[in-house]
Amino acid sequence: GAGVSQSPSNKVTEKGKDVELRCDPISGHTALYWYRQRLGQGLEFLIYFQGNSAPDKSGLPSDRFSAERTGESVSTLTIQRTQQEDSAVYLCASRLNPRDASTDTQYFGPGTRLTVL
Amino acid sequence: AQKITQTQPGMFVQEKEAVTLDCTYDTSDPSYGLFWYKQPSSGEMIFLIYQGSYDQQNATEGRYSLNFQKARKSANLVISASQLGDSAMYFCAMRGEQGAQKLVFGQGTRLTINP
């Protein structure tokens, strides 16, 4: 079946502009995650959605970052008033069912490369 | 605090040789899961292998195996018979502590397979 998809694949924006990044998880996956990967670094957790539960926003670096998810489908990550330090690859992942330890694996999308000039 | 450490920023290996990528971890949770992901130049994170802390045997998936040494808190990835297509970044990760659903990643190791 189809994997996790993200759009756009690349985004170049000017400092101070707002951007929206989109993620379509694997169909049937109840959990969705956003991560950030700066150049040459590992992934940093940003936010986690699971069904109708309140999202875990503990990784969001500032109040300029927000995310929404519609039911168990599409998610949008919004960065307001972008700064050059926001330049990174933003990766989305989904997981079948976090309540089932046998389905622990997160499957990642191709990412959105954000460049803030 | 929870931490994943990958001490090899880069490794160079001849094709067809076996390679071991190091990963050590620290956590206060008695139950945890460890993962390895491959990230080729295209950028996508590809899941390779998973080891649960209570699994009795080391995980294996094709040419990938995980050398899990719980007492030493290490979870090294072994790739047998390396291929040119194995050239990529490799990340070790573990599930967040206290039920946190996130993955905590190491800094990665860049593996280059030479012909």
Image (cartoon, rainbow, N blue to C red):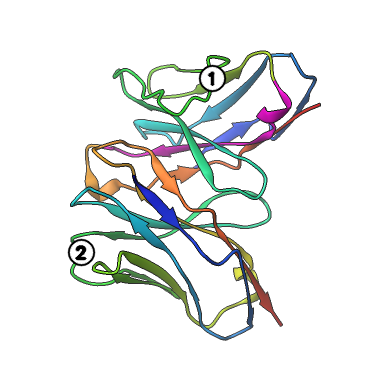
Task: Give whichever of A12, A110 is nearer the camera.
Answer: A12
Extent of the magenta region: A83-98
Residue occupying image coordinates x 60% and y 77%: B83
Give the CA separation, mark 2 to mark 1: 38 Å
In this rendering, the label closer to the viewer, 2 or 1: 1
| Image quarter in which the N terminus of chain B is found | top left
Residue type of the residue flagged with mark 1: Ser
Question: Is disc 2 placed on a helix, strand or loop?
Answer: loop
Task: Give whichever of A52, A66 is nearer the camera.
Answer: A66
Question: Is disc 1 placed on a helix, strand or loop?
Answer: loop
Q: How many marks do you count on the picture?
A: 2
B8 is higher (above) or lower (below) than A20? below
- Say which residue label 1 marks: A62
Q: Residues within 10 Å of mark 2 (few under 14, many from 20)?
A: few
- Say which residue label 2 marks: B55
Q: Position of residue A63 (x, y in %)?
A: 53, 14
Task: Give whichever of A78, A5 is nearer the camera.
Answer: A78
Tag 2 subunit: B
